Image (cartoon, rainbow, N blue to C red):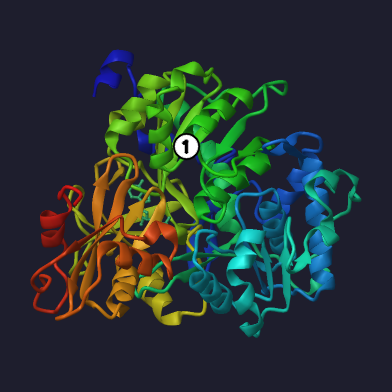
């Protein structure tokens, strides 16, 4: 480990660093609390519910919160819009526990609608804006959303289907027509400054208690059954990320034998470039929630473009960039990178997909002043469960780090016994930030969360310091950029095509995106369909990122094991390296 011999790092073991940082009296003190029938570690201090976070948001007053092109929203004005919309939701009859679906691109209205819903005890239900019409309708129906708020593009996609959704009482649109305009309730973004500075509606008057472990969000994730499942996240899951992020920074200092310096009051405002969607937990939980508690600036992009991202880093003095590895790759690889002043970068952070070890080295080489950081998490862990950063990450670039002090993990053998250090098995995790359940799906909840441990479907090994190395996935899924594609969903759809007898989806390696979907199809006797037709068939029903970039045609039955399961390893070996036709 070259770092330790050159600089004397590490000054303290990971275990000792954890013990020191979480001791009684420390800002990171932990407390055991009963959470869903288990005694779990929680942060003893800090915000407990998202209403606490919104209280802090209001105090940030005139600081800039959100920047989107030439729109700039201050914290105070954002809070006014949230309070106004929360009151309007109450007027409309939204009650604690009701689902409020939000589906739009990254606009300032996204966090306003989501925070307003959560503030009154409703369950914010962000739907994937890249979803097709069918997928969006499924999400609205499955969640039983009472209110749905769209941007014009998403509204147009599902407008013809909304009348058939019996639970849906209110449909609104931001920045468009075709439904009740959101602007009639809160005005346009530029007018939020003139809204009254009101308190949030009182939560006790709504007849609900805001328990930190009550439901706040419903984030959809795909599943092995092929249909997306809603993972219900608690307030605590999201508020915990605030201290977790500070803890990870403090841990890096302590490992160097230093104490994290307090940030001077007159230090420049920190800023994050948001290059990933808010509708995944990475955007909402790992980035937005801590950022708004801390009073940092969030810079949105209408659409990710690496060149524009570099220009924004310079213009807005961005301190944190990244999101998923695919974004970080595009920034370090960009031919115009050296034309910009990127000296404001302090952290290049990513996760949510395999992080190639080479990426950490590239980030360090290109921006020696910025700490690379890799996180591991799932929708079901409500984002960051483990994180590797700074010297630890450079020393172990293939690890996603140890879990945060709130998380525990173990590696399990197929026979249900725990694997010893170093042996690969399925990673099981538990902690207070793990999702409460899958919405309306007790069978899937039992299968995945039963016994008090979340079975991640990731194959990993742990080292003697408790760092995890994700080596593979037991679940049949691939990740393109940051978007998960469950193979069965695409395979089932391809099999519905009249010319298709059987289909398999595999990951084709891609340097920056990690993987891209490739389909292997065997046509029926006499069936005729070409690559373009099958790709168009998938595109007509599923989100664009799920459409196979290649379709290979097999002349013989696809290889299956004795149980009839496709042998993907064999297919990958045969097709994943093929040159494009
Ligand atoms: P999602 O629910 O969309 O956030 O996807 C979660 C899955 O992404 C995990 O179960 C892993 O398979 C994968 N994943 C997340 N973070 C990492 C990481 N740091 N390294 C490898 N795989 C990861």
Q: Is residue 76 above or below residue 52?
A: above
Q: Is residue 201 left or right of residue 461?
A: right
Residue 255 visible in the picture: yes
Q: Residue furthest top?
A: 6
Q: Is residue 30 left or right of residue 163?
A: left
Residue 543 lies in quadrant? bottom left
Choose between 186 and 553: the one closer to the eye.
Answer: 553
Choose between 134 and 32: the one closer to the eye.
Answer: 134
Position of the N terminus, as image quadrant, is top left
Choose between 281 and 513: the one closer to the eye.
Answer: 513
Residue drawn 31% across the image and 79% down it: 496
The CB of the residue at mark 1 lies under 8 Å from ligand 1: no
Residue 521 lies in quadrant? bottom left
Relative image position of residue 157 (x, y in whole percent) = 58, 67
Choose between 470 and 544: the one closer to the eye.
Answer: 544
Q: Which residue is mark 1?
A: 322
């Amino acid at each position: 480990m070259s770092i330790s011999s050159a600089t004397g790092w590490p000054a303290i073991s990971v275990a000792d660093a954890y013990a020191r940082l979480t001791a009684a009296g420390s800002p990171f003190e932990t407390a055991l609390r009963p959470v869903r029938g288990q005694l779990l570690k929680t942060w003893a201090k800090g915000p407990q519910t998202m209403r606490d976070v919104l209280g802090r948001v209001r105090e940030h007053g005139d600081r800039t919160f959100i920047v989107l092109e030439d729109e700039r929203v201050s914290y105070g004005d954002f809070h006014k819009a949230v309070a106004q919309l929360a009151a309007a939701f109450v007027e409309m009859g939204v009650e604690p526990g009701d689902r409020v679906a939000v589906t739009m691109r990254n606009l300032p209205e996204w966090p306003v609608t989501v925070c307003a819903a959560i503030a009154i005890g409703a369950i914010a239900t962000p739907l994937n804006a890249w979803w097709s019409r069918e997928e969006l309708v499924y999400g609205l129906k499955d969640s039983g959303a009472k209110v749905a708020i769209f941007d014009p593009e998403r509204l147009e996609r599902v407008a013809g289907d909304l009348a058939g959704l019996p639970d849906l009482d209110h449909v609104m649109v931001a920045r468009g027509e075709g439904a009740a305009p959101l602007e009639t309730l809160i005005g346009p973004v530029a007018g939020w400054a003139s809204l009254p500075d009101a308190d949030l509606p009182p939560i006790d008057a709504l007849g609900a208690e805001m328990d930190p472990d009550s439901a706040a969000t419903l984030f959809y994730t795909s599943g092995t059954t092929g249909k997306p499942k809603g993972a219900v996240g608690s307030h605590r899951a999201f508020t915990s990320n605030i201290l977790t992020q500070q803890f990870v920074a403090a841990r890096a200092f302590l490992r160097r034998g230093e104490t994290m310096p307090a940030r001077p009051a007159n230090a420049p405002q920190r800023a994050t470039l948001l290059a990933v969607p808010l509708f995944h937990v990475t955007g909402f939980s790992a980035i937005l929630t801590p950022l708004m508690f801390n009073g940092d600036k969030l810079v949105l992009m209408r659409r990710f473009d690496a060149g524009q991202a570099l220009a924004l880093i310079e213009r807005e003095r961005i301190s944190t960039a990244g999101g998923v590895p695919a974004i970080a790759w595009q920034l370090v690889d960009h031919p115009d990178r050296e034309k910009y002043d990127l000296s404001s970068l302090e952290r290049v952070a990513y996760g949510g997909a395999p992080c190639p070890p080479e990426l950490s080295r590239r980030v360090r080489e290109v921006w020696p002043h910025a700490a690379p950081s890799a996180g591991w998490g799932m929708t079901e862990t409500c984002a960051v469960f483990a994180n590797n950063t700074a010297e630890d990450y450079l020393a172990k670039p293939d690890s996603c780090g140890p879990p945060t002090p709130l998380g525990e993990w173990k590696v399990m053998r197929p026979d249900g016994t725990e694997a010893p250090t170093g042996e690969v098995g399925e990673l099981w995790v538990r902690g207070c930030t793990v999702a409460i359940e899958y919405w309306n799906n007790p069978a899937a909840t039992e299968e995945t969360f039963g016994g008090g441990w979340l079975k991640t479907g990731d194959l990993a090994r742990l080292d003697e310091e408790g760092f995890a190395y994700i080596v593979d996935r037991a679940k049949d899924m691939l990740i393109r950029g940051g978007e998960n594609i469950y193979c069965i969903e695409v395979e089932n759809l391809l099999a519905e095509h009249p010319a298709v007898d059987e289909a398999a989806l595999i990951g084709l390696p891609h340097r920056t995106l990690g993987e891209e979907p490739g389909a292997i199809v065997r046509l029926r006797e006499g069936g005729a369909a070409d690559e373009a037709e099958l790709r168009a068939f998938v595109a007509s029903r599923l989100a664009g990122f799920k459409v196979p970039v290649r379709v290979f045609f097999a002349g013989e039955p696809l290889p299956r094991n004795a149980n009839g399961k496709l042998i993907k390893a064999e297919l990958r070996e045969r097709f994943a390296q093929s040159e494009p036709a």
